[in-house]
C-alpha cells in the first residue's frame, strides 16, 4: 500500500496530529518473532533423531502426558492415541500451547503460551515422532508461495471457518475456528497437513507443497497487512461496525443535539406577546 | 459548553436587551473564535494532506476538524448570543372552514357534471387509460426469463450421461486425491462457474456411514457427494467439523449430519443437502451418474413438482 | 429592475440580491413570515434533523463515489496497488471499488464516510421514529406524515442493502444470494419475481447494473420526494410541543426560526458531518479487500448484514425449521421470518396511528405531546416491540457472540429463542409498572388543571423545564391525557 510510504513523508508536515495516528496506523499485529526463527520452528529438527533427546522426551511424556494419552501414546478414555501423530502434530500442539490441555477432554484446546521450554518441546516432539509413522515438521518456504494464489485458496478453503480476514469464527456445539492472528508459518502449515481438532486435512494428495506455501504466505501477509481504514474493529464484519454506528455515531450525535437543543437553565424568558395573527395565519414555515 | 446560567442577566440577549458583556460572554466568544480557527486549520491540514499524497486517517480527522469547528462555533454562538426568549404563536385550525369546503365541493361537482354529460366518453377515456396501464406492464416481462426448470436442475442432469467432477481449475478428480477428513469442492466438468452446481466431496468413515435406502451405490468407496448449498437460503455449507462429521452453514448455523444423508440436525434448514450419485469412469475419475437427489439451495413453492 | 431606483452604491449586496430575487419571485413577505415562524424547543425535536443531515452527507459522498465506481460484472484481472489481489480475476465493479479504496486520493475516506453515514442515518431515523411513537406525535393530524416516514424507513433499509451489495465482494454476494432465496420462497409469484429482478437465476448477468440504477437513481429519487413531502407537512401542520405552562393545543411556544433555530440546525448539520468524517477516517468499515471477489461456491465465517438488516438475519436464524408441504407444493422456511415477519412488522407500524385511534376512540387533533408515562399501555407495547426486535438483532450476531464470549452457538440459539418469547412481555410489563409508578408520583398535590395561558412570571423557566424534561412534574394539561384510559 503506497499510502503508508506517502504518509511517512507527511510526518514532518503535520507532526503533532500525525504522531498518534501513525502509531495507530503502524500498529502491526503479532509478529514478535525472534530474528533467527521467523517461521516459528522453535526446535532443532536435526536433533529429533538423537536417542538422548528421545529419552528425555519419554521422561517428560511419562510425567505430563501419560495420564491422558496413555503409556506409549496408545490413548485412554481421556485422550486420543497419538502413536501416529508425528512430529508435526506434537510440534503444533506444544508450540501453540494447546497441549497440555487444560479443560475437560471433550473441550476444545485453546491457544495459550507454551507450557514447556524450547528444549522440552524438542524432547517431547522427538519422543512422539519416535512412536510411529506420522508427518514430519514441514519445510516452509514462504518465497515459493504465490501470494495471489494463496489468497484464492484461502478464501476457497479456509475462509468458511476462519473468516476471510483470518479472525476465526464459530462452529457448532461450542467449537470454534481460532483466529490466525498469531499463528506462525510453521503452525499454519502443520495445521493444514494434520487437521487438528475439527479441522479438515488439506492433504498432500489434494494440495501441492507450493499451494500450501502460498496459503501460509497469504495468512502471513494478512497478519502484517495493517488497516488502511483506521481501527480494524476486530475485522469481524458488520456486527462491531453496527455497534460503533449505534453507540458512538448515533449515541454521540444524540448527546450533541441534547447539548445544542437543551434550554439554558433558569434564564428562559417569559413568553413574549403573540406574534401578529396575520403572520401566523399562512401556515407556511415551521 | 458549560451548563448553567449563573452570571447571566435574564434578557441579556433578548431583542432590544442591552448588550452588557459578562465574563461568560467573553469566554463564549473566545470559544467561538477558537472553534472557527480550528475549522480553518482543519481545512488547511486537509489541503496539505491531499497535496502530499493523501492519507485516510489524516483526511478524516482534518475533515472532522474543519466541519466540527464550524458546527461547534455556531452552536456556542447560538447558545450565548442569540435570542433564547420564548415566543408564542397562535396555531390555526388546519381544516378549512365549512364555507370553503362547500365552495370547493360545488366547484368540483359542477365540473364533474360537465364530464358526466358525456358519460360514455368519460368511461371510454378511463378504459383507455386502464388499458394503457396494463400495456405498460408488458415491458417488465423483458427483465428476466420465465422461471423454468433451471431452479430444479443443475448441469449434472443436463446431458443425460455421466459427467466428471472437476476442481476449480477444471482438473478431474480421482478418488485417491481425497483423504479422510478432507474437504473438496467440485463442479461438473465444463461448468466450473455454475452457481448452483458446487459439490462437496467427503471421505467418510464407512463403518458409521448410513447411506439412505436406495442410495447404497451412490458412493464410491467411502466418498460421498452432497450439494454445497444450504437448503435454507443457499449459502455454501463450507464448514466441515471432521470429528463430529457435521457440516455447518456460516450464514444461519444450519447443521447437517454427514453420516446420515446430510439430514439437518440443528438450525433453520428443513431439508437435507441433496446427494449426488457418484461413480468412477474407465479412466478412474469421479463422475456423477445423474443430477442431485433434489433441487439444490433454498425451497420454492413448486419445488416438488416436476 | 423595477426597484433599481431605490438602490444606491451603499446598499449591501445581500439586500440587493434580495431585491433582485423578490422582483422575480415576489417571495419577500412569504419568506419573512417563514423566518418569523416559531419552532418548539426541545432537544428531541432535533433527532429527525440528525437523520436529515446524515442523508445529506450520504448524497454528497455518494455522488463523489459514482464518479469512480464502475457497475459492471465484466471479468477483468486486477492490476491496482493492493498487492494481495494483483492478478486475481474479478468484476469491474469490485475492481473499481478497490481502486476507490487504494488508488483514488481521498477515495477511501469518502467510501467509509458514505458507509458510516448510511449506518448512522438509519439509526437516527429509528431513534426519531421512537420519539414520535412514544410521545404520540403520530396522532391526528399527523398520520400522513407518519406514513411518509415509515415509507422512507423501508426504502432506506432496502437502499442500504442494495448499496453494500453493489461492490461484488464475497460478503455482498452472500447477502444477494440470501435475498434471492428469500424471493423464491414467496409462494407462486416468488420465482417470477426473482427471475425478473435478477434477470434469470442467481447471480444473474446484469444484477450489478440493475442494483446500481436502483441505488443511485430510483430509490434516492423516491426517498427525496417523500422527504420533501415529509418536511412540507411539518411546515404546514407546525411542530408538536410538550405540554407546559403557556402551551396549549392552540399555540406554538418556542424560538423563532431565524436566527436561533436556524443556527442550531446548521450547527447540528456540521457536527453530524464532523462525526461521520471522524468515523470515516478513524474506524475501518467494510474492508472489501479482505473479503475478496465474489465466488458463488465460497463463503466466509461471520457473514452478516449491516445492522439495520440484523433483525431479519436474526429472524432467519432463530425461526424453527418449519416447512409446510402438500401435493408437491411447499411453503419454505425462509418465507415466515423474512417475508411474513417484515410484512407484518411494517404493516402494523404504518397502520399504528389508525389502530390506536380505533382502540382509544380518540380522533381529536393533538398538538401537545404525551409523555411516555402518560400512556402506559402504548409505552409498554412499544418497549415490548423494541425488546422483540432487539433479541432478533442479537440473534443475528449469534456466531460472533459465541466466539466473543466463548460459548456454544447452539446454546445461544436456545437462549435467544426463549428470550424472544419471554423478554418482550417482561420488558413490556416492567415498562408499564414504571409508567404507572412515575405517573402516580406526579399526581399527589397536582392541580389537575393547568391554566390555559400561564402568567408571565420569572419562575416560568424553572417550571417549564420540568415540563419538557419530566421528572416530578406536578402540573398536567388535561387536554393531553384525555381520551385514553389510564391503564
Image: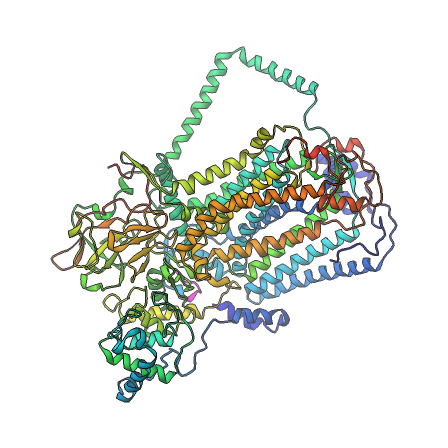
**Residue B103 quadrant:** top right
Q: In the rendered image of this protein, does residue B146 appear above or below residue B166?
A: above
Q: Relative to the observer, which residue lies in front, B9 or A221?
A: B9
Residue C451, horizontal then vertical, whole percent: 79, 35
Residue C249, horizontal then vertical, whole percent: 72, 33
Q: Residue at coordinates 72% horizontally, 44% vertically from top-left?
A: C468
Residue C238, horizontal then vertical, whole percent: 69, 36
Q: Residue at coordinates 46% horizontally, 54% vertically from top-left?
A: C397
Asked if the magenta segment contains residue C474, the reply would be no
Q: Relative to the observer, which residue lies in front, B202 or C117?
A: B202
Render colour scheme: rainbow
Q: In the rendered image of this protein, does residue C401 appear above or below residue A73?
A: above
Q: Looking at the image, can residue A162 be seen?
A: yes
Residue interval drawn in magenta: C77-83
Q: In the visual, does C372 lie left or right of C402?
A: right
Q: In the visual, does C419 lie left or right of A104?
A: right
Q: Residue at coordinates 39% horizontally, 40% vertically from top-left?
A: C335
Q: In the rendered image of this protein, does residue A61 appear above or below residue B280?
A: below
Q: Main secondary structure of the magenta part?
A: loop
Q: In the visual, does C44 lie left or right of C75?
A: right
**Residue B8 quadrant:** bottom right
Q: Residue furthest left?
A: B282
Q: Looking at the image, can residue A142 be seen?
A: no
- Total count of labels: 0
Asked if the magenta segment contains residue C79, the reply would be yes
Q: Residue furthest top?
A: B117
**Residue C75 quadrant:** bottom left
Q: In the rendered image of this protein, does residue C71 appear above or below residue A162?
A: above
Residue C100, horizontal then vertical, whole percent: 48, 58
Q: Relative to the observer, which residue lies in front, B220 or C25?
A: B220
Amino acid at each position: 500500500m503506497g499510502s503508508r510510504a506517502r504518509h511517512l513523508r507527511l510526518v514532518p508536515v503535520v507532526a503533532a496530529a500525525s504522531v498518534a495516528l501513525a502509531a495507530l496506523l503502524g500498529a502491526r499485529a503479532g509478529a514478535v518473532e525472534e530474528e533467527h526463527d521467523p517461521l516459528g520452528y522453535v526446535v532443532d529438527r536435526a536433533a529429533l533423531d538423537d536417542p538422548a533427546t528421545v529419552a528425555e522426551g519419554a521422561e517428560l511424556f511419562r510425567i505430563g502426558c501419560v495420564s491422558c494419552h496413555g503409556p506409549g501414546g496408545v490413548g485412554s478414555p481421556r485422550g486420543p492415541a497419538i502413536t501416529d501423530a508425528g512430529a508435526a502434530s506434537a510440534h503444533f500442539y506444544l508450540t501453540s500451547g494447546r497441549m497440555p490441555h487444560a479443560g475437560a477432554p471433550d473441550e476444545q484446546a485453546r491457544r495459550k503460551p507454551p507450557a514447556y521450554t524450547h528444549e522440552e518441546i524438542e524432547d517431547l516432539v522427538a519422543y512422539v515422532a519416535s512412536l510411529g509413522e506420522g508427518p514430519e515438521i514441514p519445510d516452509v518456504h514462504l518465497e515459493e508461495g504465490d501470494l495471489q494464489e494463496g489468497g484464492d485458496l484461502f478464501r476457497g478453503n479456509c475462509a468458511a471457518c476462519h473468516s476471510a480476514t483470518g479472525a476465526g469464527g464459530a462452529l457448532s456445539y461450542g467449537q470454534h475456528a481460532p483466529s490466525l492472528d498469531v499463528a506462525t508459518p510453521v503452525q499454519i502449515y502443520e495445521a493444514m497437513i494434520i487437521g487438528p481438532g475439527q479441522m479438515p486435512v488439506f492433504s498432500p494428495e489434494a494440495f501441492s507443497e507450493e499451494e500450501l506455501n502460498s496459503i501460509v504466505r497469504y495468512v502471513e501477509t494478512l497478519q502484517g497487512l495493517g488497516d488502511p481504514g483506521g481501527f480494524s474493529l476486530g475485522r469481524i464484519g458488520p456486527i462491531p461496525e453496527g455497534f460503533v454506528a449505534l453507540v458512538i455515531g448515533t449515541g454521540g450525535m444524540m448527546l450533541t443535539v441534547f447539548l445544542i437543543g437543551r434550554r439554558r437553565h433558569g434564564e428562559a424568558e417569559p413568553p413574549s406577546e403573540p406574534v401578529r395573527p396575520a403572520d401566523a395565519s399562512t401556515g407556511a414555515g415551521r | 459548553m458549560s451548563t448553567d446560567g449563573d452570571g447571566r442577566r435574564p434578557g441579556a440577549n433578548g431583542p432590544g436587551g442591552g448588550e452588557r458583556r459578562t465574563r461568560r460572554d467573553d469566554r463564549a466568544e473566545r470559544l467561538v473564535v477558537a472553534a472557527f480557527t480550528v475549522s480553518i486549520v482543519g481545512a488547511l491540514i486537509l489541503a496539505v494532506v491531499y497535496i502530499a499524497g493523501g492519507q485516510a486517517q489524516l483526511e478524516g480527522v482534518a475533515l472532522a476538524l474543519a466541519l466540527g469547528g464550524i458546527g461547534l462555533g455556531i452552536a456556542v454562538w447560538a447558545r450565548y448570543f442569540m435570542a433564547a426568549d420564548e415566543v408564542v404563536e397562535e396555531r390555526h385550525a388546519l381544516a378549512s372552514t365549512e364555507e370553503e369546503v362547500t365552495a370547493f365541493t360545488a366547484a368540483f361537482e359542477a365540473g364533474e357534471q360537465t364530464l358526466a354529460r358525456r358519460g360514455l366518453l368519460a368511461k371510454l377515456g378511463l378504459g383507455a387509460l386502464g388499458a394503457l396501464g396494463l400495456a405498460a406492464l408488458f415491458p417488465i416481462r423483458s427483465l428476466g426469463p420465465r422461471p423454468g426448470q433451471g431452479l430444479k436442475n443443475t448441469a449434472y442432469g443436463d446431458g443425460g450421461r455421466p459427467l466428471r467432477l472437476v476442481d476449480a481449475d477444471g482438473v478431474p478428480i480421482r478418488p485417491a486425491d481425497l483423504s479422510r477428513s478432507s474437504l473438496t469442492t467440485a463442479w461438473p466438468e465444463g461448468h466450473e462457474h455454475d452457481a448452483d452446481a458446487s459439490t462437496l466431496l467427503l471421505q467418510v468413515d464407512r463403518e458409521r456411514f448410513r447411506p439412505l435406502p436406495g442410495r447404497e451405490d451412490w458412493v464410491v468407496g467411502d466418498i460421498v457427494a452432497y450439494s454445497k448449498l444450504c437448503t435454507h437460503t443457499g449459502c455454501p455449507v463450507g464448514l466441515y467439523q471432521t470429528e463430529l462429521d457435521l457440516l455447518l452453514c456460516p450464514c444461519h448455523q444450519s447443521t447437517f449430519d454427514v453420516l446420515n444423508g446430510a439430514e439437518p440436525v440443528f438450525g433453520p434448514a428443513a431439508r437435507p443437502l441433496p446427494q449426488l450419485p457418484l461413480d468412477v469412469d474407465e479412466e478412474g475419475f469421479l463422475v456423477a451418474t445423474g443430477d442431485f437427489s433434489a433441487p439444490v439451495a433454498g425451497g420454492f413453492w413448486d419445488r416438488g413438482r416436476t | 429592475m423595477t426597484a433599481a431606483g431605490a438602490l444606491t452604491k451603499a446598499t449591501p449586496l445581500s439586500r440587493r440580491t434580495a431585491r433582485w430575487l423578490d422582483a422575480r419571485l415576489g417571495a419577500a413577505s412569504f419568506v419573512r413570515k417563514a423566518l418569523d415562524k416559531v419552532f418548539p424547543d426541545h432537544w428531541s425535536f432535533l433527532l429527525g434533523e440528525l437523520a436529515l443531515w446524515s442523508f445529506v452527507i450520504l448524497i454528497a459522498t455518494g455522488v463523489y463515489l459514482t464518479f469512480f465506481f464502475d457497475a459492471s460484472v465484466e471479468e477483468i484481472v486486477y492490476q491496482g496497488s493492493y498487492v494481495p489481489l494483483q492478478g486475481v480475476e474479478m468484476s469491474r465493479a469490485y475492481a473499481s471499488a478497490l481502486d476507490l479504496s487504494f488508488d483514488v486520493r481521498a477515495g477511501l475516506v469518502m467510501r467509509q464516510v458514505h458507509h458510516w453515514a448510511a449506518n448512522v442515518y438509519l439509526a437516527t431515523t429509528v431513534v426519531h421514529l421512537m420519539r414520535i411513537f412514544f410521545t404520540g406525535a403520530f396522532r391526528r393530524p399527523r398520520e400522513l406524515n407518519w406514513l411518509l416516514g415509515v415509507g422512507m424507513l423501508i426504502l432506506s433499509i432496502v437502499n442500504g442493502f442494495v448499496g453494500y451489495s453493489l461492490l461484488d465482494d464475497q460478503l455482498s454476494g452472500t447477502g444477494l444470494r440470501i435475498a434471492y432465496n428469500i424471493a423464491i420462497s414467496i409462494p407462486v409469484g416468488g420465482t417470477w419475481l426473482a427471475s425478473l429482478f435478477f434477470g434469470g437465476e442467481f447471480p444473474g448477468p446484469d444484477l450489478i447494473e440493475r442494483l446500481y440504477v436502483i441505488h443511485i437513481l430510483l430509490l434516492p429519487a423516491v426517498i427525496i420526494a417523500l422527504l420533501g413531502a415529509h418536511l412540507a407537512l411539518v411546515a404546514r401542520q407546525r411542530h408538536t410541543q410538550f405540554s407546559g405552562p403557556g402551551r396549549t393545543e392552540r399555540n406554538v411556544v418556542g424560538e423563532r426560526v431565524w436566527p436561533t433555530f436556524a443556527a442550531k440546525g446548521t450547527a447540528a448539520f456540521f457536527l453530524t458531518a464532523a462525526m461521520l468524517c471522524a468515523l470515516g477516517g478513524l474506524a475501518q468499515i467494510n474492508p472489501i479487500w479482505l473479503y475478496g471477489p465474489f465466488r458463488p461456491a465460497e463463503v466466509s465465517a461471520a457473514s452478516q448484514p449491516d445492522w439495520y438488516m440484523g433483525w431479519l438475519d436474526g429472524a432467519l436464524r432463530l425461526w424453527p425449521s418449519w416447512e409446510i408441504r402438500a401435493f408437491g407444493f411447499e411453503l419454505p422456511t425462509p418465507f415466515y421470518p423474512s417475508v411474513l415477519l417484515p410484512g407484518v412488522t411494517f404493516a402494523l407500524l404504518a397502520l399504528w396511528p389508525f389502530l390506536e385511534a380505533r382502540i382509544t376512540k380518540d380522533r381529536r387533533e393533538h398538538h401537545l405531546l404525551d409523555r411516555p408515562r402518560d400512556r402506559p399501555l402504548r409505552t409498554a407495547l412499544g418497549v415490548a416491540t423494541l425488546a422483540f426486535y432487539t433479541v432478533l438483532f442479537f440473534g443475528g450476531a449469534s456466531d460472533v457472540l459465541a466466539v466473543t464470549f466463548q460459548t456454544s452457538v447452539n446454546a445461544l440459539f436456545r437462549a435467544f429463542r426463549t428470550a424472544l418469547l419471554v423478554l418482550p412481555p417482561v420488558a413490556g410489563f416492567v415498562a408499564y409498572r414504571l409508567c404507572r409508578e412515575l405517573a402516580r408520583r406526579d399526581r399527589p398535590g397536582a392541580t389537575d388543571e393547568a391554566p390555559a395561558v400561564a402568567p408571565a412570571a420569572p419562575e416560568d423557566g424553572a417550571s417549564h423545564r420540568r415540563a419538557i424534561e419530566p421528572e416530578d412534574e406536578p402540573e398536567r394539561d388535561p387536554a393531553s391525557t384525555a381520551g385514553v384510559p389510564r391503564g
